[in-house]
Amino acid sequence: MRSKISRRAFLKGSFTAVGSVAVSSSVVQAAASLAKEETEPLVTLIDISKCIGCEECVYACREANAAKYPAPEKPFPKMFPKRVPVQDWSDKKEETDRLTPYNWLFIQPATAMVNGEELELNIPRRCMHCENPPCVKLCPWGAAKQEPNGLSRIDADICLGGSKCNAVCPWDVPQRQTGVGLYLDLLPSLAGNGAMYKCDRCYQKLERGETPACIEACPENVQTIGPRSKMIEKAHALAKETQGYIYGETENGGTHTLYVSPVPFDQLILETGKGRPAMDEVENMMADGSNLARAMLIAPIAGAAAAFGKFYKRVKEED
Amino acid sequence: MSSDHKIRKIVYGITLFFIALTGFAQMPIFKRYYIADIPGLGWLAQFYVTHAMHYIFASILIALCVYGVLDFVLSKKGFSKVTATGGIKAALIIGLVVSGGLMVVKNLSGFYFSQPLIYVMDIGHIGLCMALLMVSAYALVKKKTWVK
């Protein structure tokens, strides 16, 4: 018996199948063309052994970024439900011993036992500027962005302060200030809760070809900045020379901040908690998503195979 | 209704439900509004879990769409038989797949999108989703089919 499926219908189906697979790959191609031209990201190298804890970097950061700090309107809108926390740092602007919306960099004291003696260290802590930053990639509101020079930043004018970026950040870096931002113009009681703030690596200074304020102000040259490949090379050379250890190269799949410490990071005793990030091993938080994204390319092929399988079965039955 | 059609309808319904649920879970609302406090729903407040689930259901939806379109073409029903609600739903799903696909690429390491583009994609994706849910609800209530 002659098949009822015409050659024309078959070709039409084939073209649709090819087309649907092509759509998947063209989405990738379109996205690639929309993405900016690749340039090597900048990485900061922090030699912990050099830091004397003078906080020059902290005050330079505050001065350079003061104009970006929140200016909340009080009283704050009544939040619904009541469990929504009001986070107000506007009366605690001077706090420098943790991350806050008004303090994007702090010196974290650390101790470690080396050959039976206690060693005291000071660690400048701020956003790590991850290679694939979950705060940027998972923001549901498009309020954060990553730039080709490796920095990630939050636009406080767009941010609604849901604090998801804090929840997905392995170091809980972004900090919230209630009573400021776009949510006040939308549904202030029902959605949003302010805006999130964190180090933006002095992006305006970088755009002008200048160095971030914290690096510029350091009297001990604790931090250096440069292209990723060179800084990784430099970090390894420093670690080799000082028999030190590196943090930030592989954590969360790689970051644009490298710490070199004279003692292993898992032996550092730090005061950690809200606004005081740990220095634990961090797996690549975006790895599952990236693997599933690659697997997604199989989906149109599977759909096409199932449709053609059904078609083939029908043709055989009709024969 | 053929068994193939029934299975497809069930898979589409389950996929649409979970893809919408995990999509909304990308916003920090389920914890705020106590939904994640309901026993068994705690995972709705775990962003990495809902993110992975959203990708898995997106893959199923893409496979289902390709299967549905190809099956439709190969069975020679003709596009003129597609109803208005069917056409609108199809257009919305295509929009969701394209905007979602772009967002998946954006989430890969090494892709830098401009902020306006990210914003448009995020808002566009949720807008399309809301529209699809509304049209689907209308089609369900009014018993509107995809094809005549």
Image (tube, rainbow, N blue to C red):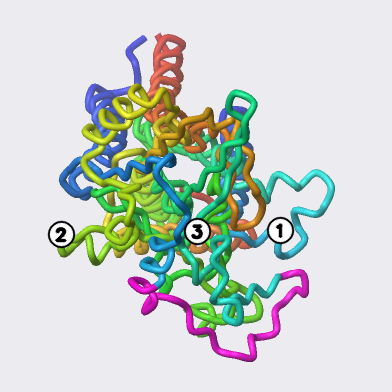
Secondary structure of residue under mark 1: loop
Residue A312 position in % (x across, y down): 40, 14
Looking at the rendering, which quadrant does residue A274 occupy?
bottom right
**Marks 3, 1 in one chain:** no
- Characterize the local packing of mark 1: few (<14), some (14-19) or many (20 or more) Cα atoms within 10 angstroms: many
Where are the magenta residues, as a range? Answer: A63-84
Amino acid beneath label 1: Lys
Please give the label number shown on residue A106.
3
Please give the label number shown on residue A209.
2
Q: Which quarter of the rendering shows the C terminus of chain A?
A: top left
Chain letter of disc 3?
A
Q: Is residue A73 left or right of residue B42?
A: left
Amino acid beneath label 3: Phe
**Marks 2, 1 in one chain:** no
Name the magenta segment's main secondary structure: loop
Looking at the rendering, which quadrant does residue A86 occupy?
bottom right
Q: Marks 3 and 1, Cα distance to the nearest angstrom?
A: 30 Å
Residue A84 position in % (x across, y down): 71, 70
Q: Is residue B48 left or right of residue A233?
A: right
Amino acid beneath label 2: Gly
Q: Which residue is mark 1?
A: B31
**Image marks 2 and 3: residues in contact by CB distance under 8 Å:** no
On screen, residue A289 above or below A305: below
Closer to the camera in the image, A49 or A84: A49
First in sequence: mark 2 vs mark 3: 3
- At x 53%, y 48%, the residue is A169
Closer to the camera in the image, A201 or A79: A201
Chain letter of disc 1?
B
Please give the label number shown on residue A274.
none
Residue B99 position in % (x across, y down): 36, 51
